[in-house]
C-alpha cells in the first residue's frame, strides 16, 4: 500500500534541462564526459554534437560515476565530468562513497535531477519524495557540493564543476521534461573505439 | 583462508608466496588500478596495492563498481583489475553487459567460495553458478589449482586481455586457497 508521501506531488522546480545543462557545463571541449542513460545521454550528445569525448550509457545502469572515476584516475591531465540522472545515480549510490575516499581532483559529478524516471514514463523517483542526493554526497565524504535550483545558482555550479580543489558534486534540479531529441551512436563497442581514437589517438 | 586455519609455517609461506607473485605479475603487465571488496583470499594483493605509491588502490562498496571502473580506465588508456570473491560476481552481472556489448578488455581474479570442500551453505549457490554466469557473459575462464601455476596463469590472462581484447576471469580455486573452516 502506498503512503501519503508516495502520493504527494513533490517539489516543483523551474529550470529546463535543455538550457540549464549547456549553461552549467560551458565549453564542452574542456572535459572528457561519461553520461548516464537516457536524459543525460541526450543532453550530452546534443551539447557535444555526439562527440568522441563523450561515452554515454544506454544500459549498465549505475555505472556512470565509477566509469568516470576509472577514466579520471587514468587521465590526470584532463578534467572528467560525469553527467547522470537521479535514477541512474540511485542505482549505485555507494559509488559516491568510493569516490569520496579517493577525492580525485579531476573528477566532477553533475547530477541532473528531474525527480522522475523519464525514460519509462515519468514515474516519481526517490528524489521527488524527499531524498536529497547532495546530502548523500556530503555524507559520502565529497567536500565540494552544491544544489542548483534557479537561474541565479548556475554560475556558482559552473565554477564548482571547473575549479573545485577536489572532487565535486553538483545537483542540478530541473523540471521533469524531455531533453533534446537527437540520434546518437548507440553501439557500445563503436563508442569505445571512437572515444579512444578521439581522446588517446589510438584504438 | 588457508592461512587462518593452519599453524603450518611451510603452508603459510606457500600462501604468501603465490599471492606476492600474483601482485608482481599484475604490475609487470602494467596494471595500475586495483579494485576490490575486502577478501582474505586477495589480502596480500590488496595490501600491496595500498602500499604501492605507483598504483591506484580502489576500495569498492560493491563489486559491480569495479566493472565500471575498469571500463573507464580502458577509455583512459590504462589497465585495471577487479579482485573479488566468487559471490561478488553475482553483484556484477548487469554491468558485465558493458564488457560484453562494448567488447572491453577486462580482467578479474576471483577467489572461489561455494566449491571444493565448502562448509558454509550460504556460499554454495553463487559458487556453483560462477562458471555458468561467466560463460553466459562470454568470459574465458582460467582456473588455478597449484601455487606454481598462479604467476604463469596471470601472464597468460594478461596477454589474452590486453593483446587479444578478451574478458578473462582467473579462478583461484579452493584447491589452491583452501576451504575456510566452519
Image (cartoon, coloured by chain):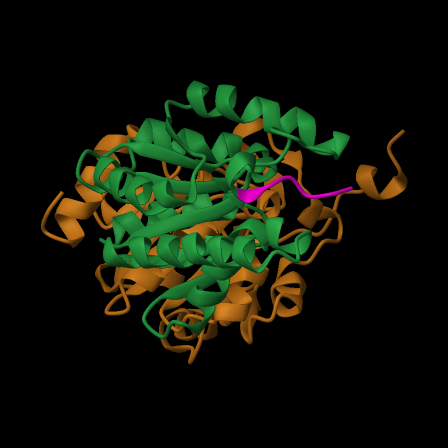
State the predominant SS element of the stretch in magenta.
loop
Residue A195 shown in magenta: no
Let me know if residue A83 appears in the view: no
**Residue A203: x percent and y percent?**
13, 42
Quarter of the picture holding the C terminus of chain B: top right
Furthest-bottom residue in view? A165
Residue B48 vs residue B165, the one in the foreground: B48
Residue lying at 40% horizontally and 59% vertically, measured from the top left: B20
**Residue B55: x percent and y percent?**
35, 66
**Residue B175: x percent and y percent?**
53, 35
Q: State the green chain.
A: B
Residue lying at 42% horizontally and 77% vertically, measured from the top left: A164
Q: State the orange chain.
A: A
In the rendered view, tell whether residue B126 sits above or below residue A155. Answer: above
**Residue B59: x percent and y percent?**
53, 60
In the rendered view, tell whether residue A73 sits above or below residue A179. Answer: below
In the rendered view, tell whether residue A97 sits above or below residue B143. Answer: below
Let me know if residue A63 appears in the view: yes
Residue B87 occupies quadrant: top right
State which region is magenta. Answer: B177-182
Residue B180 shown in magenta: yes
Horizontal relation, residue A53 to residue A198: left or right: right
Residue lying at 55% horizontally and 76% vertically, measured from the top left: A143
Residue A22 occupies quadrant: bottom left
Residue A27 vs residue A96, the one in the foreground: A96
Residue A32 occupies quadrant: bottom left
Horizontal relation, residue B89 to residue B54: left or right: right
Horizontal relation, residue B52 to residue A149: left or right: left
Residue lying at 63% horizontally and 58% vertically, measured from the top left: A133
Amino acid at each position: 500500500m502506498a503512503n501519503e508521501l508516495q502520493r504527494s506531488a513533490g517539489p516543483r522546480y523551474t529550470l529546463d534541462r535543455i538550457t540549464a545543462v549547456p549553461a552549467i557545463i560551458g565549453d564542452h571541449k574542456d572535459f572528457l564526459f561519461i553520461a548516464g542513460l537516457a536524459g543525460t545521454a541526450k543532453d550530452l550528445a546534443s551539447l557535444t554534437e555526439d562527440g568522441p569525448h563523450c561515452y554515454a550509457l544506454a544500459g549498465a545502469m549505475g555505472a556512470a560515476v565509477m566509469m568516470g572515476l576509472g577514466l579520471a584516475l587514468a587521465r590526470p591531465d584532463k578534467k572528467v565530468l560525469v553527467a547522470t540522472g537521479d535514477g541512474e545515480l540511485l542505482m549505485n549510490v555507494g559509488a559516491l562513497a568510493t569516490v569520496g575516499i579517493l577525492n580525485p581532483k579531476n573528477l566532477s559529478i553533475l547530477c541532473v535531477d528531474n525527480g522522475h524516471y523519464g525514460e519509462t514514463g515519468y514515474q516519481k523517483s526517490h528524489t521527488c519524495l524527499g531524498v536529497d542526493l547532495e546530502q548523500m554526497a556530503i555524507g559520502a565524504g565529497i567536500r565540494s557540493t552544491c544544489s542548483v535550483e534557479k537561474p541565479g545558482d548556475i554560475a556558482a555550479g559552473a565554477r564548482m564543476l571547473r575549479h573545485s580543489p577536489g572532487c565535486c558534486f553538483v545537483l542540478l534540479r530541473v523540471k521533469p521534461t524531455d531533453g533534446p531529441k537527437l540520434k546518437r551512436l548507440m553501439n557500445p563497442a563503436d563508442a569505445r573505439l571512437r572515444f579512444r581514437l578521439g581522446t588517446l589517438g589510438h584504438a | 583462508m588457508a592461512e587462518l586455519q593452519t599453524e603450518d609455517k611451510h603452508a603459510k609461506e606457500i600462501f604468501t608466496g603465490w599471492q606476492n607473485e600474483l601482485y608482481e605479475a599484475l604490475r609487470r603487465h602494467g596494471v595500475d588500478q586495483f579494485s576490490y571488496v575486502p577478501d582474505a583470499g586477495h589480502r596480500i594483493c590488496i595490501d600491496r596495492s595500498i602500499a604501492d605509491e605507483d598504483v591506484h588502490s580502489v576500495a569498492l562498496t560493491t563489486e559491480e563498481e569495479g566493472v565500471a571502473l575498469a571500463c573507464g580506465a580502458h577509455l583512459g588508456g590504462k589497465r585495471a583489475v577487479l579482485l573479488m570473491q566468487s559471490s561478488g560476481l553475482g553483484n556484477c552481472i548487469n554491468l558485465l553487459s558493458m564488457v560484453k556489448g562494448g567488447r572491453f578488455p577486462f580482467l578479474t581474479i576471483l577467489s572461489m567460495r561455494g566449491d571444493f570442500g565448502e562448509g558454509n551453505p550460504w556460499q554454495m549457490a553463487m559458487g556453483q553458478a560462477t562458471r555458468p554466469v561467466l560463460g553466459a557473459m562470454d568470459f574465458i575462464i582460467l582456473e588455478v589449482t597449484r601455487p606454481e601455476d598462479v604467476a604463469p596463469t596471470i601472464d597468460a590472462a594478461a596477454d589474452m586481455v590486453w593483446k587479444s581484447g578478451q574478458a578473462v576471469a582467473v579462478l583461484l580455486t579452493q584447491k589452491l586457497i583452501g576451504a575456510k573452516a566452519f
